[in-house]
Image: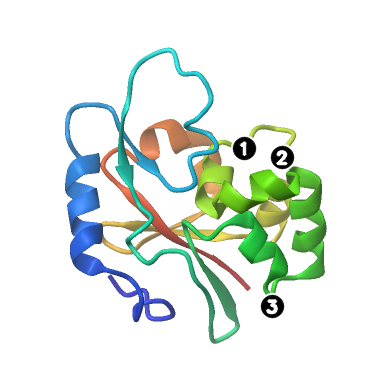
């Protein structure tokens, strides 16, 4: 994993273990904040808890702002380097209580056509970094195929210029 900007906190062994669990045949989903998974589902699912992987930080890498996938919307909102347009979008997206638990990656995974946050991230040409393999996927390319694109994979960070 070449997550240079957040590698000091990322637990690579736990990330590999999470990827192994996500790659099983059963429908296993990543659990970051749990806001989307707490809504009723048509079938049972198993979850892999991501909270101890160290994917909740925000840092800079050159001219890019790098957000860990499990960084909460509230943390992102209050970070000094978050662009004002994104702060406005986050406030419109969710109330304070929801922002405390909703993660950046989870919010993008569950976004529908009314998501102001997803629209703002699209406008900023956000890039998702997916493991294994440090695969970089533009958010605009990812959203239409997100239901199948992450089978056995894990978003570890989101990058914007």
Q: Is residue 56 above or below residue 112?
A: below
Tag 2 residue: 115
Q: Secondary structure at mark 2?
A: loop
Q: State the quadrant of the N terminus.
A: bottom left
In the image: residue 76, left or right of residue 142: right
Report which residue position mark 1 lands on: 111
Residue 120 x/y as whole percent: 73, 54
Tell me where residue 136 sits by quadrant. bottom left
- Looking at the picture, does residue 8 appear above or below residue 32? below
Residue linked to disc 3: 81
Q: Residue at x 17, y 47 (%)?
A: 20
Quadrant where the image shows the C terminus: bottom right
Q: Is residue 118 visible?
A: no
> Label 2 near label 3: C-beta < 8 Å?
no
Residue furthest to the bottom in view is 62
Marks 2 and 1, how far apart in space? 6 Å
């Amino acid at each position: 994993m070449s997550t240079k900007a957040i590698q000091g906190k990322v637990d690579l062994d736990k990330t590999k273990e999470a990827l192994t669990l996500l790659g099983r045949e059963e429908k296993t989903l990543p659990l970051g904040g749990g806001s989307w998974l707490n809504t009723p589902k048509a079938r049972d699912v198993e979850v892999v808890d991501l909270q101890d992987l160290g994917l909740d930080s925000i840092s800079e890498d050159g001219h890019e702002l790098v957000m860990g996938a499990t960084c909460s919307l509230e943390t992102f909102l209050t970070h000094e380097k978050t662009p004002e347009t994104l702060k406005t979008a986050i406030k419109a997206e969710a109330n304070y209580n929801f922002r405390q638990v909703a993660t950046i990656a989870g919010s993008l995974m569950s976004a529908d056509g009314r998501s102001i946050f997803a629209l703002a991230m699209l406008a900023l040409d956000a890039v998702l970094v997916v493991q294994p393999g440090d695969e970089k996927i533009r958010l605009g390319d990812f959203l239409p195929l997100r239901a199948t694109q992450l089978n056995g994979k894990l978003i570890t960070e989101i990058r914007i210029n």
